[in-house]
């Protein structure tokens, strides 16, 4: 039998939508450099589990491709450099600042596991791309880094301070993506709602959204990735009320529903502010749907504090939950706080996930009989405007069509086509 054909450059991606953007840019840069038999591992440092999975994938990649060069980059590689460089499977580490440069992927004569010289993480080369292989949506990075220091988070140490792509360049890139056939653009960043704070005139995220929709009239759908609830500016709120092409879906970085835990996390919003934002947006855009990131078992979290987070699912009307049992990250203030027992954190995470599944089921029930505009994706799934998943068997990816929701399986709507 013939051996399977392996791509010259393979990228293994962990973590957020921003990593998807950067991984695509890395792959193209490496191919432009003529790389052969190269595996790039783009790591994530959000949780200890994400780091564990990346290390596991590196070992597997070496077993599968013993002669390949394995280059490791991303947030986990930045904040745990010694740990990753000590892995015998790793050829070298690459700093985030260099990952979009073709010369970073030229064959290396340095000794195995040699660390690349660090460069200024503020010298951002924005990975603007004209499309994404095999993906319906185009992800457009408009911001990087973070100026906040949440006590559980190591991302600022790997990404550096917040910086924004110039507004005019973002609009130009959106035009290019639409011209290349993108039916939907998702704006991404580490701290998306801090967009513009470092630019002349300090244009907020809402101004960027308005500019894209005004100057790219052929863009069918514009969507936002995760945002910080406290930084949702007035222009952005108004855009949800007035711009039909801005999709009625927001994923909120809430993390907890208890004010004392939020304070110990060094979050900048309160429970009441999260509930107020959701209520205000729902009043302006009744069809809006909310998702949220939530941490279970943060240090010092009591059962009563957890109950506040559990109740927030109902009080904010959350539908799509990303739940993380807390895991200590070395060097962060939270790692030095009194820890919740691991089994208690996992139990609370399971209860939050169950609440999320019930909320999603109620949302799906409410969609039955409604007329939807669905954008198809790979794998027999599509998305309604509010990000509700829809089963689309046998439908080619990247197409819009209208359909009536007829039922669901607990995770996706089923439809009757027009």
Image (tube, rainbow, N blue to C red):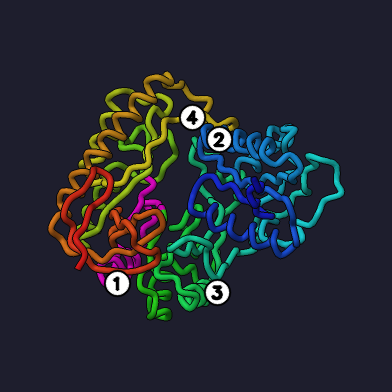
- Give whichever of 37, 282 is nearer the camera: 37
Which comes before the other along the chain, label 1 or label 4?
1
Q: Residues within 10 Å of mark 2 (few under 14, many from 20)?
A: few
Residue 127 picture location, percent across and down: 60, 63
Separation of disc 2 and disc 1 at Cα?
40 Å
110 falls in the magenta region: no
Cβ atoms at labels 2 and 1 below 8 Å apart: no
Which comes before the other along the chain, label 1 or label 3?
3
Q: List the residue tagged with mark 2.
A: 53
Q: Which residues are magenta?
A: 226-253
| Point 71% across, 48% down: residue | 94
Q: List the residue tagged with mark 4.
A: 327
Above or below, comparing residue 25 to residue 321 in the picture: below
Separation of disc 4 and disc 3 at Cα?
38 Å
Q: Nearer the viewer, mark 4 or mark 2?
A: 2
Residue 133 picture location, percent across and down: 53, 62
Residue 372 picture location, percent across and down: 22, 64
> Residue 243 — which label?
1
Which comes before the other along the chain, label 4 or label 2?
2
Above or below, comparing residue 60 to residue 110 in the picture: above
Q: How many marks?
A: 4
239 falls in the magenta region: yes
| Point 75% across, 61% down: residue | 34
Q: Nearer the viewer, mark 2 or mark 1?
A: 2
Separation of disc 1 and disc 4 at Cα?
39 Å
Separation of disc 3 and disc 2 at Cα?
35 Å
Left or right: residue 112 versus residue 46 is right
Q: Residues within 10 Å of mark 3 (few under 14, many from 20)?
A: few
The secondary element bearing badge 4 is classed as: loop
């Amino acid at each position: 039998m013939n051996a399977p054909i392996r791509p010259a450059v393979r990228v293994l991606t962990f973590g957020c939508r921003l990593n998807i953007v950067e991984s695509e840019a890395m792959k193209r840069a490496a191919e432009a450099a003529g790389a052969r038999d190269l595996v790039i591992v783009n790591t994530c440092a959000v949780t200890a589990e994400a780091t564990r999975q990346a290390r596991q994938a590196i070992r597997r990649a070496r077993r599968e491709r013993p002669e390949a060069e394995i280059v490791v980059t991303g947030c986990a590689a930045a904040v745990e450099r010694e740990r990753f460089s000590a892995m015998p499977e790793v050829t070298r580490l690459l700093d985030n600042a260099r990952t979009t440069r073709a010369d970073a992927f030229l064959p290396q004569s340095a000794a195995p596991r040699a660390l690349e010289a660090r460069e200024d993480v503020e010298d951002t080369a924005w990975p603007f791309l004209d499309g994404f292989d095999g993906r319906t949506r185009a992800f457009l990075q408009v911001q990087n880094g973070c100026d906040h220091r949440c006590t559980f988070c190591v991302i600022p140490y790997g990404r550096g301070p917040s910086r924004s792509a110039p507004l005019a360049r973002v609009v130009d890139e959106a035009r290019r993506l639409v011209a290349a056939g993108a039916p939907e653009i998702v704006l991404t960043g580490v701290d998306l709602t801090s967009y513009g704070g470092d630019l002349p005139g300090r244009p907020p995220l809402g101004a960027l959204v308005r500019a894209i929709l005004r100057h790219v009239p052929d863009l069918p759908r514009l969507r936002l990735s995760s945002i910080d609830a406290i930084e949702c500016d007035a222009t952005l709120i108004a855009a949800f009320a007035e711009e039909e092409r801005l999709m009625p879906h927001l994923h909120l970085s809430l993390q907890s529903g208890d004010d004392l835990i939020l304070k110990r996390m060094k979050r900048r919003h309160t429970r009441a502010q999260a509930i107020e934002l959701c209520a205000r947006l729902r009043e302006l855009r009744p069809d809006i749907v909310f998702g949220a990131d939530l941490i279970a078992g943060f240090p010092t979290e009591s059962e009563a504090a957890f109950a506040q987070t559990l109740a927030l699912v109902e009080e904010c009307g959350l539908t799509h939950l990303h739940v993380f049992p807390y895991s200590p990250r070395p060097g962060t203030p939270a790692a030095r706080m009194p820890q919740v027992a691991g089994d208690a954190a996992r139990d609370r995470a399971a209860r939050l996930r169950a609440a999320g599944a019930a909320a999603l089921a109620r949302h799906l029930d409410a969609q039955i009989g409604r007329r939807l505009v669905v954008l198809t994706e790979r794998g027999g799934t599509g998305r309604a405007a509010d990000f509700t998943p829809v089963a689309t068997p046998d439908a080619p990816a990247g197409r819009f069509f209208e359909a009536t929701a007829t039922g669901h399986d607990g995770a996706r709507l089923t439809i009757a086509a027009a």
